[in-house]
């Protein structure tokens, strides 16, 4: 049975993430439909990772098997004809049957892009053609403190503080043992420009009353109007006692500037759900508070409430997967 590896690039804006969902457009579902149109076979392509709604990919990897042999060049051309312009196939090649897009991966690289504004927000707007691909941050943001913060995560660490909290796991542990303390509230995600100052609900937990964070997308008057996290990066007295396997190795973590855009690039052995976006949100907050050296304390806390908010999905790109 032919087993295929394909590298694809996509604009995540029109899709509800990678993973197939009933009645919703997803990258995995759209790719599966294209394969079915070409071959008549029903397959579910396996990706190297499940990108969230609005997250983009420069080089996502997917694997799938077919029962009928097809020349790679023909399959490549046919897929691009069957897919919408928001998804393009970069390459198609046969691979051994035990090759798996996710399980065989050794390293992944992500980029996050921020367009900071000048000291007067009204002086700059985010171009509409750029808006779906950057975090349009309406306040000044300096490169040096961002870079200083980013260096602290190099090496092998427990990244529980930067992982999305699993509410199902929390519930199971609470009901199974009276000795397990309740999980501290999760840090909220950044508000959407279409829903300014709305109570923030995240995929990591329930709505958090009296704990709103609005780190700007675009518009608004002044930094004084922006609510900041009340914790100011004070770490919990005790680390979370919820069992985790959240240790990862980061090989590269650095910021650079390309014209007006600040770009964070990180390479690691793997990434937890929302980990890169939580890192970026925390780096931005520490840069604003002039305390980038607090990152080791946040790591040591092993508690999501110790870190900053979740940066918007639209600035995140999956850049490369290494095998």
Image (spheres, rainbow, N blue to C red):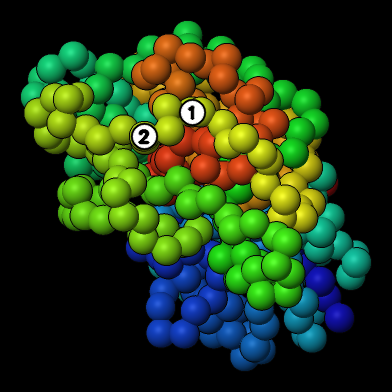
Question: What's the residue at 28%, 17% (across, down)?
Answer: 140
- In this orientation, does residue 21 appear? yes
Does dot 2 land on a helix, a strand or a loop? loop
Count how many numbered circles sit on residues in the image. 2
Residue at mark 2 to residue at mark 1: CA–CA distance = 8 Å
> Is 273 positioned to the left or the right of 99 in the image?
left
Nearest to the observer: residue 161 or residue 234? 234
> Is 199 positioned to the left or the right of 243 in the image?
left
- In this orientation, does residue 112 appear? no
Q: Is residue 87 above or below residue 57?
A: below
Residue 113: which numbered mark, if any? Answer: none
Residue 46 x %, y %: 69, 68
Q: Quadrant of residue 118?
A: top left
> Is 290 positioned to the left or the right of 73 in the image?
left
Asked if the residue at tag 1 contacts the one at tag 2, i.e. Cβ–Cβ closer than 8 Å, the answer is: no
Question: What's the residue at 23%, 28% (across, down)?
Answer: 138
Does dot 1 land on a helix, a strand or a loop? loop
Q: Which residue is mark 1?
A: 233
Name, please, the residue furthest toward the front.
178
Question: What's the residue at 52%, 36% (across, down)?
Answer: 307
Residue 25 x %, y %: 41, 74
Residue 230: which numbered mark, if any? Answer: 2
């Amino acid at each position: 049975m032919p087993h295929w590896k394909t590298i694809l690039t996509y604009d995540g804006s029109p899709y509800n993430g990678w993973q197939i969902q009933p009645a919703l457009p997803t990258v995995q579902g759209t790719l599966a439909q294209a394969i079915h149109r070409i071959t008549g076979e029903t397959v579910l392509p396996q990706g190297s990772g499940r990108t969230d709604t609005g997250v983009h990919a420069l080089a996502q990897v997917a694997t799938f098997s077919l029962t009928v042999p097809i020349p790679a060049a023909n399959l490549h051309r046919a897929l691009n004809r069957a897919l919408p312009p928001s998804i393009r196939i970069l390459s198609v090649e046969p691979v051994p049957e035990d090759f798996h897009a996710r399980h065989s991966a050794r390293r992944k690289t992500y980029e996050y892009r921020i367009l900071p504004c000048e000291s007067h927000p009204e002086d700059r707007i985010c171009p509409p053609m750029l808006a779906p691909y950057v975090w349009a941050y309406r306040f000044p943001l300096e490169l040096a403190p961002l870079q200083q913060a980013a260096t602290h995560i190099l090496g092998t660490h427990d990244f529980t503080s930067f992982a999305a909290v699993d509410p199902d796991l929390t519930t199971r542990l609470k009901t199974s043992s009276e000795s397990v303390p309740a999980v501290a509230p999760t840090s909220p995600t950044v508000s959407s420009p279409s829903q300014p100052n709305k109570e923030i609900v995240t995929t990591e937990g329930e709505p958090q009353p009296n704990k709103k964070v609005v780190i700007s997308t675009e518009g608004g008057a002044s930094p004084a109007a922006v609510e900041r996290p009340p914790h100011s990066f004070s770490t919990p007295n005790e680390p979370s006692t919820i069992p985790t396997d959240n240790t990862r190795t980061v090989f590269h973590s650095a910021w650079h500037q390309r014209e007006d855009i600040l770009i964070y690039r990180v390479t690691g052995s793997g990434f937890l759900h929302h980990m890169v976006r939580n890192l970026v949100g925390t780096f931005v907050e520490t840069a604003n508070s002039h305390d980038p050296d607090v990152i080791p304390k946040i790591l040591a806390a092993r508690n999501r409430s110790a870190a900053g908010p979740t940066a918007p999905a639209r600035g995140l790109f999956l850049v490369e997967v290494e095998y």
